């Protein structure tokens, strides 16, 4: 039998065995869209021992646009390498090109379900290995300043984050380093893990690692359900924060992260809130200190005021006592003033030196003498001194002879 005869028999047998189209489940191992519009694929199925089966397939240009648009409307993504798909195809055998499948339908719901089943298997594995809550044991410093951001260059989510964080109305300052990575598709997990490795081996110490995506279709974001990526995030020694999708999205990467939020803008708010809370705490402490100092000052002022009043009162008493003593002294001085004596009808005798004469015995004949009266003065000399009987006899007698 010649080869061509064998090929003809194979074709005849396959045509008889598969007269109509069949539904087949497989994984896309390669995909190539040609300029003529045809799409060529390699489909495979793998097991523990490796690849179990592999076959070529074609989506002709006449069916490609319909299949691609419908698949994208349901899943949000085009057919990609690594997807598990359920498709309808005609089994074809060509004597030259061999066995192939002509695909005319692809079920997008199956692909979504397959991704969810794989997601659940990943979650169970992470739980069994104790990785789900490992990041929750890490904590941020009170004022996180140095941030490492993993995102795609030019991504709108990254731009929104930077604008909201660095352009904040409070003037808070952050240090943000950008690490580029692919953020969707089959290459994303490996690219993000490479960025994580670059962060951990850099010379900078970061307070947090931020993974920013900003939404997308379910299949676009399926890379964030990858086991290897989730394990790398869980084992990262720095707190990892994720802002991957919108409200309806929650991925395995979010589960294992220290903290996840829905959008990059919300993540910026999270870090700003750390500074706002600390600023309010400091303001509260400042107010309490101000009140404490004010109370202490008021108490001190009251004490000083009381002491001042006591000192003033004591000084007034001392001054009053001193004033009273001065008045008594003045009265005594006035009472001893010779002019007061003269005003009472007495006279004052002074010797030649102007010294008051206390007795007649202190003078002798010929001594100058002055007699003071209230209305004038008499000047003269002593002519005779006459002493009273109580005086000594040797003093003799004398008299005053006015000039």
Image (cartoon, helix red, strand yellow):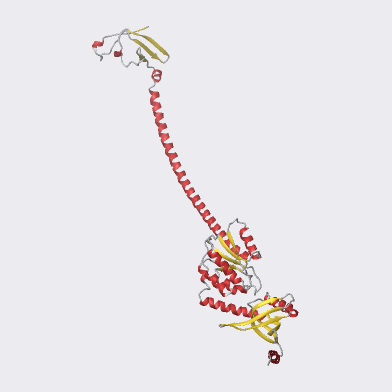
**Image quadrant in which the N terminus is located:** bottom right
User: Is residue 289 placed above or below 391 in the rendered structure?
Assistant: below
360 with respect to 141 (left or right): left
Residue sitting at 61 percent across and 71 percent down? 188
Where residue 370 appears, as percent x and y from the top left, is 37, 12
| Residue 250 visible here | no
Where residue 14 appears, as percent x and y from the top left, is 69, 90
Q: Residue furthest left?
A: 393
Residue sitting at 43 percent across and 37 percent down? 315
Where residue 180 appears, as percent x and y from the top left, is 61, 65
Q: Quadrant of residue 262?
A: bottom right
User: Is residue 7 placed above or below 202 in the rendered structure?
Assistant: below
Q: Quadrant of residue 162?
A: bottom right
189 with respect to 39 (left or right): left
> In this view of the protein, which residue sits in the foreground, 19 or 294?
19
Q: Residue furthest front?
A: 2
335 with respect to 163 (left or right): left
**Image quadrant in which the C terminus is located:** top left
Counting every numbered tag in the picture gives 0
Where residue 112 appears, as percent x and y from the top left, is 64, 79
User: Is residue 221 placed above or below 369 in the rendered structure?
Assistant: below
Q: Residue furthest right?
A: 62
> In this view of the protein, which residue sits in the foreground, 161 or 309?
161
> In this view of the protein, which residue sits in the foreground, 99 or 125?
99
| Residue 232 visible here | yes
């Amino acid at each position: 039998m010649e080869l061509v005869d064998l090929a003809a028999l194979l074709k005849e047998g396959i045509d008889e065995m598969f007269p109509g189209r069949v539904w087949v489940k497989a994984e896309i191992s390669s995909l190539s869209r040609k300029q003529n519009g045809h799409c060529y694929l390699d489909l495979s199925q793998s097991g523990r021992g490796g690849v179990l089966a592999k076959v070529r397939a074609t989506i002709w240009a006449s069916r490609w646009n319909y299949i691609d648009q419908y698949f994208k409307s349901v899943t949000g993504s085009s057919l990609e390498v690594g997807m598990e798909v359920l498709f309808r195809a005609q089994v074809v055998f060509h004597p030259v090109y061999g066995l192939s499948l002509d695909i005319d339908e692809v079920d997008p719901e199956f692909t979504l379900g397959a991704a969810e089943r794989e997601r659940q298997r990943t979650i169970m594995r992470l739980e069994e290995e104790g990785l789900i809550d490992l990041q929750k044991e890490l904590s941020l410093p009170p004022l996180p300043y140095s941030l490492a951001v993993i995102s795609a260059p030019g991504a709108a989510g990254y731009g929104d984050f930077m604008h909201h964080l660095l352009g904040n109305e409070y003037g808070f300052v952050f240090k943000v380093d950008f690490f580029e990575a692919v953020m969707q598709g089959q290459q994303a997990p490996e690219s993000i893990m490479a960025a994580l490795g670059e962060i951990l081996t850099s010379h900078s110490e970061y307070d947090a690692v931020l993974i920013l995506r900003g939404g997308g279709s379910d299949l676009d974001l399926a890379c964030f359900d990858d086991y290897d990526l989730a394990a790398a995030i869980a084992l990262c020694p720095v707190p990892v924060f994720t802002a991957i999708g919108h409200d309806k999205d929650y991925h395995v990467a979010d589960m294992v992260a220290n903290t996840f939020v829905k959008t990059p803008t919300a993540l910026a708010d999270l870090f700003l809130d750390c500074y706002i809370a600390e600023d309010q705490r400091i303001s509260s402490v400042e107010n309490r200190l101000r009140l404490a100092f004010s109370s202490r000052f008021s108490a001190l002022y009251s004490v000083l005021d009381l002491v001042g009043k006591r000192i003033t009162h004591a000084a007034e008493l001392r001054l009053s006592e001193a004033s009273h003593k001065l008045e008594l002294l003045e009265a005594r001085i006035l009472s001893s003033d010779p002019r007061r004596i003269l005003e009472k009808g007495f006279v004052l005798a002074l010797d030649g030196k102007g010294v008051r004469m206390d007795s007649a015995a202190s003078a002798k004949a010929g001594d100058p003498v002055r007699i003071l009266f209230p209305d004038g003065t008499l000047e003269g000399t002593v002519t005779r001194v006459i002493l009273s009987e109580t005086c000594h006899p040797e003093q003799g007698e004398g008299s005053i002879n006015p000039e």
